[in-house]
Amino acid sequence: MPKKYVVFLKTIWRSWFIILVIIIIILAIYNPLAAIILSIITIALFIASYIPSFFFKNRLLRFLKKYYRIEESDIVKGFGKEKDKIRKNLFNLSQNQEKRDWLIILLNNKYIFYHRDLIEKFIELQTKGYGEKELFETFKKLDINTRAEIQTIEETLKRHNRINQKNQNSQKIE
């Protein structure tokens, strides 16, 4: 019995906007001033509903910047929130990182965050002509476990136009 009640409430919650619009239209017919006030309150509540997610995203980013490299599982343990919510925010952050100084990659179906200092050092060594093997040996001290990680970092930086591809191609030819 309680499960049916919960399902009913979830159904209503999913269609709350349509129900609210119908109520406002009916109210506008009988009392336009009340409909305007209800509309303003609804818009204010709708905007206010985005504030917690905005603060969560900023808190998550501040937490991430404390580490040179941190994996998704460690973020979930250290941050103490739901895995799906953190994963969703990491996905959103990874989509909008072209002008950011940090980097988030997806490797083996888990997100990994890299600090600004590590990425600057990576780009610096990359432009000096270090190959994948030399980069891996250099960054092994910072818990980079595989060469696939180095490749993924490099591909992500190229995809976001944060690494000079022409310079790298000319160094490979020499």
Image (cartoon, grey):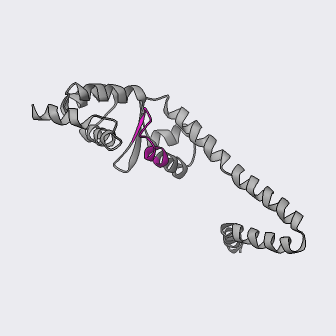
Residue in the image at 19% along x and 31% along y? 131
Residue in the image at 49% along x and 30% along y? 65
Magenta stretch? 91-104
Q: Is residue 41 above or below residue 7?
A: above
Q: Is residue 41 left or right of residue 17?
A: right
Residue in the image at 26% along x and 25% along y? 125
Q: Is residue 76 above or below residue 3?
A: above
Residue in the image at 60% along x and 42% along y? 56
Q: Quadrant of residue 33?
A: bottom right
Looking at the rendering, in which quadrant would you find the N terminus?
A: bottom right
Query: Is residue 42 a member of the stretch shown in magenta?
Result: no
Please state which of residues 110 and 161 is positioned toward the viewer in this rendering: 161
Query: Is residue 94 a member of the stretch shown in magenta?
Result: yes
Q: State the image coordinates of residue 133 (x, y, percent, origin top left).
A: 19, 32
Looking at the rendering, in which quadrant would you find the C terminus?
A: top left
Q: Is residue 23 left or right of residue 14?
A: right
Q: State the image coordinates of residue 79 (x, y, percent, origin top left).
A: 55, 39
Please state which of residues 106 and 174 is positioned toward the viewer in this rendering: 174
